[in-house]
């Protein structure tokens, strides 16, 4: 497997030029191990996970991107990464960069004013990914994963750095949970593929959880239709999955420990109009949004937690499928 994909790796410099992705720089800040949350470059594993952390930086009146030297925010960054790491890291090496993520205050701005701050965040993500490819990947299959802002960055990375078929051939799947992606984007970037079942590879897996009565959110503004797959039955239509299909909701702490696990917490179905994942068996007052940018009934911060065990199992299923299809 590694020998076959090493041939692919040799061509990456040329392919990045074709895809519009920059070349890695010898002076990249990601040459410094301190700029990685996780850099498991010495672990024997079947694949790599490149994980992009969700938003933990609040921002201030005059600061809109995280300072890479802010140790308090970096501690929260590590904690938020740990909360989701256990879904992905079995049989995988884990790579997660710190980056100058946009603050929560950016999401309080009109959408057209956010982009300059998100561009700063993406600049770091692309830099980290290219450094990872040049120095650590060695032709390994890649699971790209992120949540919220991290999911947005994952999709941007797919658009820019996976445009060539040979680069895309390393992609097991992209778990871009808690962000929207539209048919228009898929059409604009034909190398992007959205998942259609539980074991297809080279695809995007995404959904946004909300109560049945919600009609508008930051994640899915009213009038938008986003693509989604149901993490309980792995269907993209509106077929309802019962709570009995939920293998376990897991609520984790900043060390990644599961402090509470609830099998069969809730079922879910995809709203055919919004593309939202409608959660059927919990109430908004039981799981409040916590963050002020979300209204009651937006279960954004629970996207991973409500469906933890199903997602964890699915990562293994897709990796097994990829290895089966790509092993000589």
Image (spheres, rainbow, N blue to C red):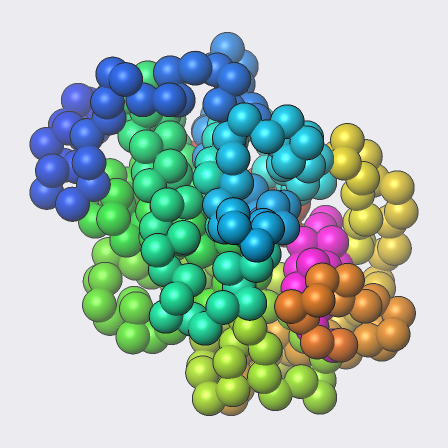
The percent position of residue 81, horizontal first and vertical second, equals 63, 37
Magenta-highlighted residues: 297-309
The percent position of residue 323, horizontal first and vertical second, equals 42, 35
Which quadrant would residue 276 be assigned to in this image?
A: bottom right
Say which residue appears at 49% left-offset and 68% top-offset: 109
On the question of residue 110 being in view, the answer is yes
Q: In the rendered view, does 149 fall on the left or right side of 74?
A: left
- Above-or-below relation of 281 to 30: below
Say which residue appears at 17% left-offset and 22% top-offset: 10
The percent position of residue 14, horizontal first and vertical second, equals 10, 32
Say which residue appears at 49% left-offset and 23% top-offset: 35
The percent position of residue 234, horizontal first and vertical second, equals 57, 64
Which quadrant would residue 207 be assigned to in this image?
A: bottom right
Total count of labels: 0
Q: Is residue 299 magenta?
A: yes
Q: In the rendered view, does 116 fall on the left or right side of 109?
A: left
Q: Is residue 319 magenta?
A: no
Say which residue appears at 37% left-offset and 30% top-offset: 128
- Above-or-below relation of 276 to 300: below
On the question of residue 173 being in view, the answer is no
- Above-or-below relation of 227 to 273: above
- Above-or-below relation of 9 to 102: above
Q: In the rendered view, does 150 fall on the left or right side of 300?
A: left
Magenta stretch mostly in which secondary structure? helix
Question: Viewer-proximal residue, 314 or 53?
Answer: 53
Q: Quadrant of the N terminus?
A: top left
Name, please, the residue furthest toward the top: 42
Q: Quadrant of the C terminus?
A: top left
Q: In the rendered view, does 33 fall on the left or right side of 231?
A: left
């Amino acid at each position: 497997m590694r020998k076959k994909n090493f041939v692919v790796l040799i061509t990456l410099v040329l392919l990045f030029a074709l895809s519009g992705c920059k070349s890695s720089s010898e002076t990249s800040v990601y040459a410094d191990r301190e700029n990685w949350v996780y850099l498991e470059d010495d672990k024997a594993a079947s694949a790599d996970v490149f994980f992009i952390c969700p938003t933990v930086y609040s921002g201030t009146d005059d600061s809109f991107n995280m300072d890479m030297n802010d140790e308090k925010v970096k501690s929260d960054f590590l904690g938020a990464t740990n909360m989701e790491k256990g879904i992905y890291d079995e049989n995988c090496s884990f790579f997660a960069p710190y980056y100058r993520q946009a603050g929560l205050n950016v999401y309080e701005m009109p959408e057209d004013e956010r982009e300059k701050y998100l561009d700063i965040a993406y600049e770091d993500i692309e830099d980290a990914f290219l450094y990872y490819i040049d120095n650590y990947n060695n032709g390994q299959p890649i699971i790209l994963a992120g949540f919220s802002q991290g999911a947005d960055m994952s999709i941007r990375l797919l658009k820019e750095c996976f445009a060539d078929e040979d680069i895309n051939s390393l992609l097991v799947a992209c778990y871009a949970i808690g962000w929207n992606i539209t048919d228009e984007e898929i059409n604009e970037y034909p190398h992007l593929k959205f998942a259609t079942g539980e074991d297809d590879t080279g695809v995007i897996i995404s959904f946004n959880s909300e109560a049945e009565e919600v009609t508008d959110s930051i994640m899915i503004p009213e009038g938008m239709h986003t693509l989604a797959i149901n993490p309980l039955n792995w269907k993209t239509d509106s077929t309802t999955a019962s709570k009995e299909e939920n293998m376990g909701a897991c609520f984790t702490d900043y060390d990644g420990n599961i402090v509470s696990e609830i099998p069969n917490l809730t079922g879910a179905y995809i709203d055919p109009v919004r593309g939202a994942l409608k959660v059927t068996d919990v109430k908004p007052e039981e799981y409040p949004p916590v963050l002020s940018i979300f209204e009651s009934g937006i279960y954004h911060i629970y996207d991973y937690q409500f469906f933890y065990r199903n997602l964890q199992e699915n990562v293994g299923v897709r990796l097994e499928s990829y290895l089966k299809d790509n092993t000589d």
